[in-house]
Amino acid sequence: MTIDQKTGLISWERTVASVQPYTINVKASNRIGRTEVQWSLKVQLSYNITIEDVTPTGVLAVPKTIQMRGMVNYFSGTLQSLMAFVDVKVRNKGRITTMSIVTSPRNRGRFEAVYFPKAGDSGLFEVDGRHPSDTGFTPQKSWSVLGMMCVPGYVNRQAYLDADVVEMRGVSLLKNDGVNRISNITARVEGIGGPLTSVVVRAGNRLSSNGSRPLIVFLDTDSEVSIDVILTVSHPLRPLRGVIAVVFSTPDGTTARVRIGLQLNVRKPALILSPSSLSDSVPRGTQKTFQINIKNEGEVTAKSLRVTLPSEPRLTMSAYSTTTTTASEDRLDLLPNETAILVLTVTTGATDSLGQFSGSVALNSDLSSASISYRFYVTSQEKLNITVRVEDEYTYFASDKPLVSGAVVTLRNPRRRYTEQRITSNHTELVVFEDVDEDRYTLTATAPGHGSYWAVIIAKPSDPSITIFLQRVAVKYTWTVTPTTFQDKYIVTLDSTFETQVPMPVVTVEPASLNLIPYEEGKKDVINFNITNHGLIRADNVRFALPSHPTLIFTQTIDPIGDLPANTSIIVQISVKLKTRVKRNLGTLACGLKMLYDYYCGGTRTGGQDITLTRTYPGRPPLPMCS
């Protein structure tokens, strides 16, 4: 709205029609004072709407798309426009759906509208056409849709399978939510299979199992009927989980559906064993008995509860009974809250091997099972003194045949909570563990300048002496990192320290570190290794364990290398070739280059030296390699 400052006339150029009058407020003020005036202005509608036709019409079995046609009626004395705005309104169950459209410019004053059905549409549908400013509603045309629905549409049900037939009452309500009577409603069930052999649907006193005859003859408007289902399952009874659907339909196609989540459980005995497991020591040539209490804490009888023993001749069943019943053929019936007693006997022979034997005893009934695990240790009541002799290479090759001094020897048996330690103090001392039970033990030994020893032994009177061999560590390697004057630059070197002129093989190999990059790039193809025996004893069967590499083939040119006498060196050449027709992946790791040799020292011993593989470009960080 605008006000002409000279004439004071108020003008409204694009007037919007309205059923209700507009309220207009005008305020004016100057230096003398101010005033306010209010009045009502009614802008009449220029046209109304007529709905001429809806297709299809009448009573529909299922929701369908509805075509609607109509025209605009201009009032006398109003100017007809090329196009007019129209609100087509559809009312169903108190809810109004509005479709805003315009009339056709080629067929002035006429329009068409389409109503697309929604899921679950049913009942009476009324149509009206209105000017957009008119909020009223007066039905002009109508149609109706038959409708029924299940409340709830999904339900979870649990039950116990005490028999092969289970009845579930009131799983849902089938309601007629339309405005017309529905007739000849049948029911069918989807999802039957497996142990679920049949499902019968019941409404009142009528049954329908396969949809072949009406379950409900008629269902009046706003009425409902309770739905039951009767399930039949096959033997043997076992738990069942799944979903079935009951589909209701009429000959005209009106449908409703309820989905039922089934959880069918079987009442079972609950077998509680006390103790739940057996563990004990049984000396040779003795017998021990063990009592197990078996209580049924379930809701039903454990029928034909039988005991199954493993194929272990030392384990037998001595008794199996309740307070009122003795087992027949290793089986009995155990009532709810009743307790059975099982007696097991373990018998060991005088010459049985020491150590553990284990397994489980099974208990099985028609509906439940349980087991009791056992772990028995065959022990001995005899005691002995264990003598341990600790040797190294000098014991065999040195003239004075010394034993290892400073060796720490430990004897352990965790089950007996036994741990004892002895230390050799000179080159002639043996260690003795006194008054030790005949049994299995873990024996370990360490000494400065030697490798370590670990073994599981059986301490027995017939063989109380044990010899341990600790291999001397004659060659040591040390990485040295030297900072340079340049920031973040270091020189890394590998230094070796080894013994010479000693009564044992002391074999070294040079180079002890190898950069593979030149070989991967094809710049080098030969490695010359200098193998030296610095000791006074021959090294036998000198050999290389060559690495596996994705792009390189390592070949030993002298094969076999043979023996390496004392104070002797030999050069062994390793050929390195690039693999053909292989896509090179220089980021792949390569591992396993090692020099090995043997020597006899109370048995064949093996020594060796790892050759460290690197992948380094000058001035760059090292690439990945094996640790």
Image (cartoon, rainbow, N blue to C red):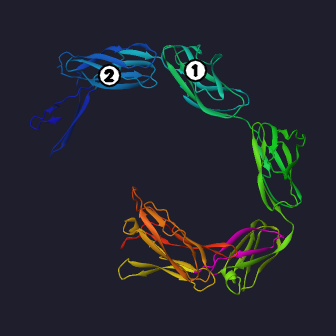
How many marks overall?
2
Q: Which of these two is toward me, 408 or 107?
A: 408
Give the foreground label among 1 and 2: 1
363 within the magenta span: no
Q: Is residue 626 left or right of residue 334?
A: left
Which residues, given as a range, are shown in magenta?
448-474
Please tell me how crowded label 2 is: few (under 14), some (14-19), or many (20+) other residues with Cα within 10 Å.
many
Residue drawn at x 40%, y 78% is: 490
Point out the image quarter for the N terminus: top left
Whole-percent x, y for residue 497 in the image:
54, 83
Callout 2, which amino acid?
Answer: Val
> Mark on residue 116?
none
Residue 340 in view, yes or no: yes
Q: Amino acid at mark 1?
A: Arg
| Secondary structure under the numbered disc 2 in the rendered image | strand
For the residue carrying disc 1, how many other residues have a C-alpha within 10 Å: few (<14), some (14-19), or many (20+)? some
Residue 149 visible at all: no
Residue that label 1 marks: 188
What residue is shown with label 2? Answer: 88
